[in-house]
Image (spheres, rainbow, N blue to C red):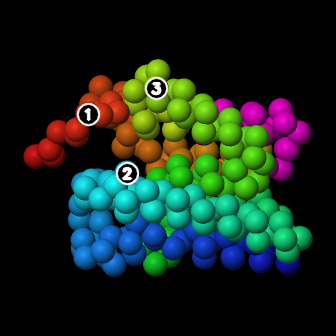
Amino acid sequence: MDILLPLILGYLLGSIPFGLVITKAAGLGDIRAIGSGNIGATNVLRTGRKDLAAATLLLDGGKGAIAVIIAYLAGWRPEIAGAAAFLGHCYPVWLKFNGGKGVATFLGTLFALHFPAGLFAAAAWLGAAFTIRYSSLAALIAAAATPFIMYAMGKPAFAIAAIFMTILIFIRHRTNIARLISGAEPKIGEKKEAVT
């Protein structure tokens, strides 16, 4: 039960599409019809509402953290709760398994699982983003490095969960990877060209 319960709880928490709920409640319609069609904070920002984007970012990160904290308090496997919350965000049953890219939920989960690892991932993302100016590539670099850091910090079970989340981040960023390879991925501060 210490595996099944955090799996169910984490998935259900993670599958709450806060970006979609918040934008609909604000009268902005379906966020999936805007910009990239993603339900995450980056796409919510394209509505012009920074407050809603910030709320989405915090809530998407928070649901991963809350799942982990509940698992800790209940004596369950926190890494399973966190990984399940991440899975729920990326593939929510309510949205026909088409969710967000998971970066905020990944960071929130890491901070709750092992705070130093969360700090490392956030610092790695910020450092890479500042240096190379590609948000997506910075996220991929931070995600790829995190399992190694978890293992080096003496958290092998958490490292396995981080590997699972990293693989999903790469899968969810496959269009970004294709644009990076072709040179079409916009840098931070640049606008995407309209798709024709």
Q: Position of residue 174 (x, y in %)?
A: 42, 43
Task: Say few, some or many: other residues with alpha carbon within 10 Å of mark 1 (under 14 / 14 to 19 / 20 or more).
Answer: few
Secondary structure of residue under mark 2: helix
Q: Residue at x 76, y 53 (%)?
A: 113
Q: Position of residue 34 (x, y in %)?
A: 24, 60
Query: Which mark is drawn over residue 42?
Result: 2
Secondary structure of residue under mark 3: helix
Circles 3 and 1 in contact, beta carbons < 8 Å: no
Q: Which residue range is magenta in the image?
A: 142-158
For label 3, the residue is 130
Q: Quadrant of the N terminus?
A: bottom right
Q: Amino acid at mark 2?
A: Thr
Q: Which of the pair 71/90 is nearer the observer?
A: 71
Residue most extreme to the left: 196
Q: Which of the pair 28/193 is nearer the observer?
A: 28
Q: Position of residue 165 (x, y in %)?
A: 63, 50
Q: Which of the pair 44/157 is nearer the observer?
A: 44
For label 1, the residue is 190
C-alpha gap between disc 3 and disc 1: 14 Å
Q: Position of residue 89 (x, y in %)?
A: 53, 64
Task: Say few, some or many: other residues with alpha carbon within 10 Å of mark 3 (under 14 / 14 to 19 / 20 or more).
Answer: few
